Amino acid sequence: MYSIGDILLGIAASGIRLATPYLYAAIGETLGQRSGVLNLGVEGQMLLGAFAAFYVTYRTGNPWLGLLAAVLVGLLMGLAMAFVTVNLHAEQGISGIGFYLFGLGMSDLLFQKLLGTVDSVKGVPDAHFPLLSDLPVLGELLFRHNWMVYGAYALVPLAWFVLNKTPWGLMIKAAGENPHAADSLGVSVAKVRYATVTLGGILSALGGASLSIGLLKIFQQNMTSGLGFIAVALVYFGSWRPVGVLMGALLFSLVNALQLWVQVLGLPIPADFAVMAPYVLTIVVLVIVVQRARPPAALTKPFTRE
Amino acid sequence: MRRSILLLLVLALAAGLVACGGGQEAATQAPAEEAAKPFRIAVVMPSAINDMAFSQSMYDALVKLQKEMGGPEKMEFVYSENMYVVDDAAAAIRDYASQGYDLVIAHGSQYGSSLQEIAPDFPETSFAWGTTVDTFKEQGIHNVFAYEARAEQGGYVNGVMAALLSKSGVIGVVGPIETGDAKLYIDGFKTGVLATNPDAQVNINYIGSFSDVALAAEAAKTHIEAGADVLTGTAQMVVGAIGVAKDNGVLWFGTQADQSSLAPEIVVANQVYDWTVALKPMVENIQKGVLGGEAYSLTLANGGLTIQYNPQFDLPEDVKAAAEQTIQGIIDGSIQVPVGGE
């Protein structure tokens, strides 16, 4: 019926899709943390972004307008988070949880009042590349996903380039490692952090949209079900490097895809253990990574000019 | 100083919004005059009233019961939804009990141990707990009713139809966690498939979550890649799987509520719960002064379970006839659906 090759192909394609929302959120979080801000509100930003994208797509029939709505919502959530952490010097962990709860409750409330029931939309279309999409194996694996998937993977080299090859990257890292030195050299730590946290908000919201109008084309309350928090863990997993984050997201997603197949094939592993596998693996790798990686020195520390 | 106040404000606002979203909403307006006191029901449920599954089935039943009892003057009800944190649910149950509701329903098997603690503190209040058969009678508690759905019965019927409609002989199931009525439904479904076509292959996937829509969708894709051309699943996260089925033109069987509207072209039939079958005798008992100790089951025989065919799906006559025959067989006992069948 199906060969080992089919199964491996299925796992790889599943893993690539499942990693998409994590990538948006975790790359955004990476930029924020490199500049010294821990944003635990990712999940809330994703949920509101997912809802905004879905609702606008539902009303207008145009997924690109839906994406624009997600960007706007993410922008506002990001600005609010930046205001609370940069201007008000709030404790970052606590205020992040506040934003999470806000996003969870608000997306739920809006869903109840504006939609009231689970429905589906057309959403972002699948890509179709001439010739490439029709290739056997590779076509299914790489060239037939919806456009949101490609956006997520494009972020990785982009973020790497910005962080390592541009003056902006230097400013971000300076703000996160030694804000006082950066400040004395004329870098506005506040502006840098505003930029990264706001961008992080936008990317998280897009991550939510990649679920609601990309992969699933539905909205349901609390549909992210914790993946915003996994995304924060992936930043540590990836030692604050975009490529590391990509590796983490892919590993987590591939193991998740693998455990789905383990059950379908009826292998004698209890479902509960199979389901645990990606989480256990992530914790194990985290423990190993934490031994050698060092977080940005000023992470979670509010900056005050002296 | 100023900024800590502002932060507090933001947090309070966020918490307030969660409360709104979580919704403790009076579904009815209090009657103007208190001539005859209405029967008052409160329910605490784990997901949303419009989840197209478990919680919605209870909400719909309460709306129906209200109508049958004579409207808001005779019966009023309130609910707390999205109580997936058991501690929050326990607090809500206690609140409702102390507010003097006649019947407080804990709609979720995870609320059992909380209820066991709370019920003895309110001996004048009646509680109901589902889905279970345990009324805590043996623990000396006499004010708890139990209710459950014999989901394996409709699961079996769905399984018979699935086996007849599948061309590949491979059928996929997306489940949450291997427990409660999800397990009953899935076990019954598998038995029904194999009774109809012993050569069929039923692949079962428990994804370990009631809310992870993305993983449910990916599980459905996995089933399709493994050759499945008919899918089913249970709990509120299956909406993700239904979307995948729709995109791939694969048939879907629903349970807990009518899911036809999500994908009218591929949903074949749904097992629908009608909890009024359990709620009505509870209300009658309470009005007679009996506050608990009874367990009620929804079955095909008592009308608590029904198979609703999607009118927009062109179901072949012989398949429908086989389904009806199976329903009759389960009702008259000539077909036995083993529980917890391996």
Image (tube, coloured by chain):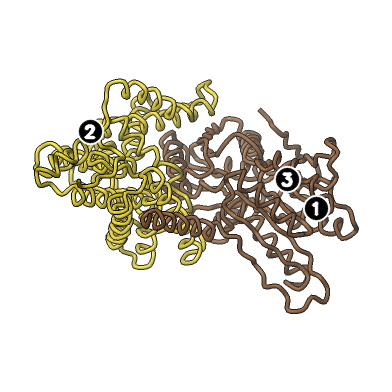
Chain colours: A yellow, B brown
Q: Which residue is mark 2?
A: A241
Mark toward the viewer: 2 or 3: 2
Q: Are marks 1 and 3 in contact (CB under 8 Å)?
A: no
Amino acid at pointer 3: Glu
**Residue A278, relative to residue B224: is it above or below?**
above
Q: Residue at x 79, y 75 (%)?
A: B34
Comparing A28 with A266, the one in front is A28
Crowding at mark 1 (Cα within 10 Å: few <14, some 14-19, many 20+): many
Q: In this orientation, does residue A221 appear?
A: yes
Location of residue B282 in the rendering, given as x and y in whole percent from the top left corner:
81, 55
Q: Are marks 2 and 3 in contact (CB under 8 Å)?
A: no
Q: Split into 4 quadrants, where in the image is the N terminus of chain A?
A: top left
- Secondary element at tag 3: strand
Q: Quadrant for residue B233, please give it.
A: top right
Residue at the disc numbered 3: B148
Residue reaching furthest to the bottom: B32
- Res B315 visible: no
**Depth order, front residue of B111/A196:** A196
Residue under the point 55% across and 39% down: B176
Chain of the residue under label 3: B
- B217 to B68, vertically: above or below: above
Chain letter of the residue carrying label 2: A
Q: Indicate the amino acid at tag 1.
A: Ser
Check disc 1 and report the residue beneath it.
B126
Q: Earlier in the sequence, mark 1 or mark 3?
A: 1
Q: Name the amino acid type tagged 2.
A: Arg
Side of A119 where A62 appears, left or right: left
The answer for how far apart the CA atoms under marks 2 and 1 are is 57 Å
